[in-house]
Image (cartoon, helix red, strand yellow):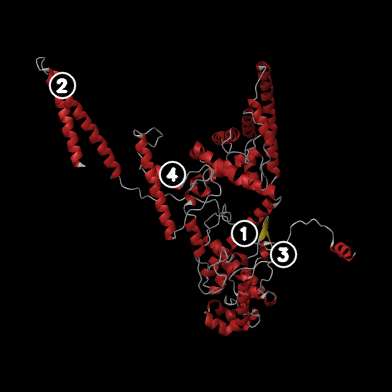
Amino acid sequence: MSVLILDKQLFSGTSSLLQTHSRHAPASIPSWHGSMIRYFCILSAASSSLCSASITLSSILLMPKDKSKPAPRGSSRNSSSRGSKGKSKPQVRFTATADKDKGKHRGSPSETGSSTGTARKKARTAAGAQDSTGQGTSTAAGTASGSGATTGTTDGTQPSNPGLATNADQGSTGAAGDTVGAEAEDGTPTQKRLRNPWGIQPKEVEKGAKPTQRAFQRVIRALCGLLTQHDILPSAEGKLNHYDKRFDKVDDMRFHMRTLVDQSRTAVREATERAKTVLRDAERASGPIANDIARIPAAHLSTVFTMVQKAGLQGFCPDVEGPVQSGCNQLHRHLAVAAFQFLSSSFGLMGLNVNNEVAHHHNLLEDMYNNFVYGTLAQNTKMERRRPGSLSQSQKNSTAYKTRTRLATAQFNTAHTLKLRKPVQRMVYINEVHSDDEHDGKVHRVREKTGRNPIVTKFLLETLDVKTEEYRKCNMRSGQKGPPTRQRDDPLLPTSDIGLILPPNVPIDFFTPEFYNSLTVKERARYVTTGVAFPLAQYAFNESHAQWMSMGKAEFMKAYGNEVLSLYNVPSAEEITELSDSDAGEELDDEEEIDLADTDNEMDVDEQEVAGMV
């Protein structure tokens, strides 16, 4: 490398000297001398160019390999915890259980890492996880373009050497791809394929921008008329036809302009009526979405709907079934961003905690719009059209799951603080142990929990609920108001569909003896080694026997547990062995083939027998 640089300097100096000499040489110098000078000038210039090319080639060959790892992409899947204000559930592991189904149930404290089959599946799909989905580019290419390996500028200008920039970009992309492949072979977690590749993922939005994102979503819902979580987008077919008419050929321009002026006057009146209708419906509806929309002043909302009408749209209805980058959808996105920026700058969103700096970030708002419209709204619309009523049921179950998770987390923290027995802590940690309820004002309409032992119910209500409420009040700051006191409503509501699920890995005395003994052998076998949590009713709430709460396994079983266990018809070792053999035999048996093909003879069986006898 140094030799090439010295040669370049030598040839450059020789060229300059010869050129200077040729300019100042007298006229008496022979012609052959001038030809020789020109020959040396050409030779030195060629040598200089050759050295420059050699240096460039050496810099490429000696360029360090880009070993930066691709940035991980986020996932949209987090339906159980999205929007929840409660604390995340602590990750706990108990090793006392030896259930054969351990690790198959979500939310179990004894749950371990992913299985070997899952790791192999992730390794097989490692390469496909880096490919682009929809309009999103691959992570490896994004890392290569942002790692500094290319010579192009970051402001979008053309690099000085396009060929060099392309080669470096490709090399960096290959290096990142090799890194991902190595990670997959090592068994490290791979990046999940995005369920919605459009826009920015919710987990990628900074915490300070979350309120602004929520306010922007409220504005989009107000434009679409979606005041509750159960509302879906209507079909955009008719509005698309109205939008396409603006591109028709015009024969009489004068008449066309007069028509546009008349339509513009009508648009203002329609926008005013539309704003009044939305605000009136929002006041009648209940829920956080409708309450936030009802705060928008009528004059501001009328201006927003006027923008939509004068843009040539019959109404704000994105075409979620069509291409995202179509002209109509891009117009909808531009109007939504402009409307939100107008409302935020004119104090039309008071009380929604909008950050003005985030509200004027145009590109970020466009990404938020794409993710919300073509992710949340599009998925809800397709789900409801495919199975009417499924969206409402899914949201009810989601709310119930969130309520149970918060309740399980709070009661587990209380049980852990009280240092109760490990089987008790393991039981209250599981979400399925707790009954789902519906909040109606200040009353929690609690549902029944089929098969739950009354001892468990009484302990949850009179011990853990009371202690949890005491801890909450002690930890509250001055002037802070917590959630209302949990009140039960009698009689209890019937059991819901999610309440019928048997909780995994709970102690055997979670169930009543009658309910447990009525289960199948396979179901009863799941709780053979899960232990016993409580003594009998006459000891569980007796202050003279309160020491059972902190006893070890051997001491507890000798004092109380064996007496409780005698009430349950636990499967024997022979029954469990037979069950395992029968399950293995069922897996090996071939499925019975059933012929469901259409036949030419459609007569009934009786008619066929009569025909045969004749």
Residue kind at label 3, given as amino acid type: Leu
Q: Residues within 10 Å of mark 3 (few under 14, many from 20)?
A: some
Check the image and name the residue furthest to the bottom: 558
- Towards the viewer: 337 or 237: 237
Instruction: Please give the residue where the numbered disc 4 appears in the rendered image.
Output: 142
Q: Amino acid at mark 2?
A: Ser
Look at the image and tell me in which quarter the N terminus lies: top left
Measure the alpha-carbon separation of dots 4 and 2. Answer: 56 Å
In this rendering, the answer to whether 409 lies above or below 352 is below
In-front residue for pair 3/381: 3
Q: Which residue is mark 1?
A: 401
- Which mark is in front, 3 or 1? 1
Q: Residue at x 70, y 41 (%)?
A: 281
* N-term-proximal mark, 4 vs 1: 4
**Circle 2 residue:** 35
Q: Secondary structure at mark 4?
A: helix
* Left or right of residue 301: residue 144: left
Q: Nearer the viewer, mark 3 or mark 4?
A: 4
Q: Is residue 520 left or right of residue 116?
A: right
Tell us which disc is closer to us: 2 or 1: 2
Q: How many neighbours does mark 1 have within 10 angstroms: few (below 14), some (14-19), or many (20 or more)? A: many
Camera-nearest residue between 283 and 12? 12
> Distance from label 2 to label 1 (Cα)?
93 Å
Quadrant location, the C terminus = bottom right
| Residue 361 in view here | no
Considering the numbered disc 1 on the image, is that residue within a helix, a strand or a loop?
A: helix
Looking at marks 3 and 1 on the same chain, the residue that comes earlier in the sequence is marked by 1
